[in-house]
Image (cartoon, rainbow, N blue to C red):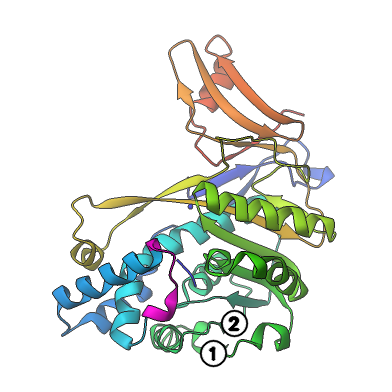
Amino acid sequence: MARFCNLSVKCIIAQNLPPTHKGREKTVAMTSPSLPSDLRAALDGKLDGLSRQDIAARAALISKTYRDGGNSITIKSEVDALAYALVRMPATYAAVTACLNALLEARPDLTPQSLLDVGAGPGTGSWAAAEAFASLRQFMLLDINAALLTLARDLSRDHPRLSAMTYRRDPAALDEVEAADLVIASYLIGETGYAERHQLTERLWARTRDTLLVVEPGTPAGYQRIIALRAQLIESGAHVVAPCPHDLECPLSKPDWCHFAQRLPRLRAHIQVKGAELPFEDEKFSYVVLSREPAPRHFSRVLAPPDVGKVEVSARLCTADGLENAKVPRRDKPAYAKARRWRWGEAVVDKS
């Protein structure tokens, strides 16, 4: 089921420029982590006339089920599905959007035509992909939960492209649907048993015509699931697009783990249902984007919030050669000014 790297709305990248543009910068517009206005309106419309107290109680029960290792089986009705969507959809959307932004950084000319959203839930990943890629025309959603797929259909009814989505909920669907240019599996792997994950990874890759995005919670366990899938698919010939600047073994060792965080605004209904006080929340996630074709990689990834001091900026980077504790002194004014703007999860263009 569907459930974020702090990337600016516009990222300046240089590593993918054609040779004739050497030395010039290229701007790629990035998608906002906030839910699209038409999706917010659709959620508000579904909520109209329902008891906020009842929705909050259902959301609390669903959240507890997931924390206890359960899955979507507890979501049985339309109201259950709405309660889940109000609590998780904003954060899931923000996480998937940040990952797609990282993909666009690396492959700004990517124009997928078809999407396969596996474990789609209420369609969050499909909404994020539709916002990121105007080229998408075919949307296939897979989820075994009927209530969530019904909600996905209802929420997208007035969307110019998503309204034509198709969906299946039978367990064999993943082995029978056509391969897609872009495949998304967000917060799905953790819902399967350990013995099933290797086979599920193979099945996801078999349906990937070009690019696969897998997102998991930003916990040590979520990271381990991402690393296992990453290693398995690299052995099968896949290439890492993001977040890693290489196809080598992850250089991190315990207790460290690779994860990122995306801050997102909370909707009024979101605040009411969660009983939250702050107008925002931070979603932590781990992810990997894999492709059948290697992408140009001349960047390093910021692995943690940089330490910005008066003397220097210190940042931990994942580079093509492994980990680097970068220190940018203030006396190098141009480099220091750039380093001050580095953000956790950002791709930093290598000088070379």
Instruction: Note whether 185 is above or below 175 in the view shown.
Output: above
Range of the magenta residues? 67-74
SS of the residue under disc 1: helix
Instruction: Note whether 273 is above or below 335 in the view shown.
Output: below
Residue 118: where, in percent of width, then height?
Answer: 59, 76
**CA neighbours of label 2 inside 10 A, class few (<14), some (14 to 19), many (20+):** many
SS of the residue under disc 2: strand
* Residue identifier under label 2: 139
Does residue 45 appear left or right of residue 32 in this picture? left
Q: Amino acid at mark 2?
A: Phe
Of 291 and 111, the residue lying toward us: 291
Of 273 and 18, the residue lying toward us: 273
Residue 154: where, in percent of width, then height?
Answer: 39, 88
Of 30 and 229, the residue lying toward us: 229
Magenta span contains residue 181: no
Alpha carbon distance from label 2 to label 1:
7 Å
Q: Amino acid at mark 1?
A: Ala
Residue 318: where, in percent of width, then height?
Answer: 66, 34
Residue found 66% across the figure and 67% down from its top? 195
* Residue identifier under label 1: 164
